């Protein structure tokens, strides 16, 4: 076998090329959403910003709602990877606190991703779409997950709250903090706000 043949790079499969173009379009969409909002970004602009044709995103996803639904899932999976790393080996209230720390790490390393994800979340409130259904599924899973975490906490057994009620408080603290940060990024220090939320969550869980 010749040296040229041995060192010739392997050609990407169609599936690999599609995955790469999707990833680049998702990243382009993140920046466009952060800069100008989900309403103003277009599929054509997303395609060209990613370095592809104007029609690629529309050809692959048909509508902006379908594309945004896929983008939310993509961003949510990236967040879940950070969450899984941070909560591995923990239980009970320690898992809850580790989850907040994971969000702090995600804010530091991927602030644009968090901004885009929550701008898309709030974009869905005034109309029912595929994105709305995706968001409902994500919120349901997050509340269920938080309830499962706190149910493992020994000190929580004396709390007047149910695990489900705690999960609602957890989501209210976290999502409310992010909302304030989106509205006033210069006035709200999200990392500090999340640090304070750990204290509140420990108190709600019956700890100190």
Image (cartoon, helix red, strand yellow):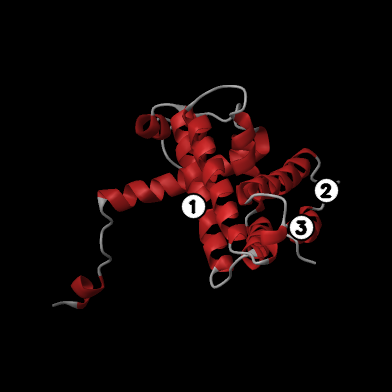
- Is the residue 9 above or below the residue 163 in the image? below
Residue neighbourhood size for the residue with mark 1, other residues' Cα within 10 Å, grouped as few (<14), some (14–19), many (≥20): few
- Seen in the picture, residue 98 relative to 69 is either above or below; the reply is below
* Residue 112, numbered circle: none
- Residue bearing the label numbered 2: 188
Residue at the spot of label 3? 191
x, y (%) of residue 83?
Answer: 56, 60
Residue 152, quarter of picture: bottom right
- What residue is shown with label 1? 77
Q: Earlier in the sequence, mark 2 or mark 1?
A: 1
Q: Are marks 1 and 3 in contact (CB under 8 Å)?
A: no
Distance between the alpha carbons at the discs numbered 2 and 1:
26 Å
Residue at screen point 78% across, 59% down: 203
Q: CA distance from mark 1 to mark 3?
A: 21 Å
How far, Cα to Cα, is label 3 from label 2? 9 Å
Outermost residue toward the right in this view:
187
Which structural element holds mark 3?
helix
Question: Left or right of 197: which side holds 103?
Answer: left
Q: Position of residue 6 (x, y in %)?
A: 21, 74
| SS at mark 1 in the image | helix
Residue 27 relative to residue 18: left or right = right
Image quadrant occupied by the C terminus: bottom right
Q: Earlier in the sequence, mark 1 or mark 3?
A: 1
Q: What's the residue at 86%, 46% (across, down)?
A: 187
Left or right relative to 18: residue 199: right
Residue at the left extreme of this rendering: 1
């Amino acid at each position: 076998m010749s040296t040229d043949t041995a060192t010739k790079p392997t050609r990407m499969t169609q599936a690999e090329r599609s995955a790469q173009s999707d990833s680049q379009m998702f990243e382009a969409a993140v920046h466009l959403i952060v800069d100008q909002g989900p309403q103003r970004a277009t599929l054509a602009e997303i395609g060209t910003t990613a370095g592809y044709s104007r029609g690629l995103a529309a050809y692959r996803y048909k509508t902006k709602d379908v594309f945004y639904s896929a983008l939310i899932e993509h961003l949510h999976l990236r967040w879940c990877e950070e969450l899984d790393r941070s909560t591995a080996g923990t239980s009970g209230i320690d898992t809850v606190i580790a989850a907040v720390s994971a969000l702090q790490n995600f804010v530091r390393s991927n602030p644009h991703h968090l901004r885009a994800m929550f701008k898309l979340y709030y974009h869905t409130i005034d109309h029912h779409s595929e994105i709305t259904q995706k968001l409902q599924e994500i919120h349901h899973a997050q509340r269920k997950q938080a309830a499962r975490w706190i149910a493992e906490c020994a000190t929580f057994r004396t709390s007047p709250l149910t695990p489900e009620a705690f999960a609602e408080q957890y989501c209210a603290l976290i999502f409310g903090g992010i909302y304030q940060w989106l509205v006033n990024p210069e006035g709200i220090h999200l990392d500090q706000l999340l640090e304070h939320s750990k204290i509140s969550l420990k108190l709600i869980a019956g700890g100190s």
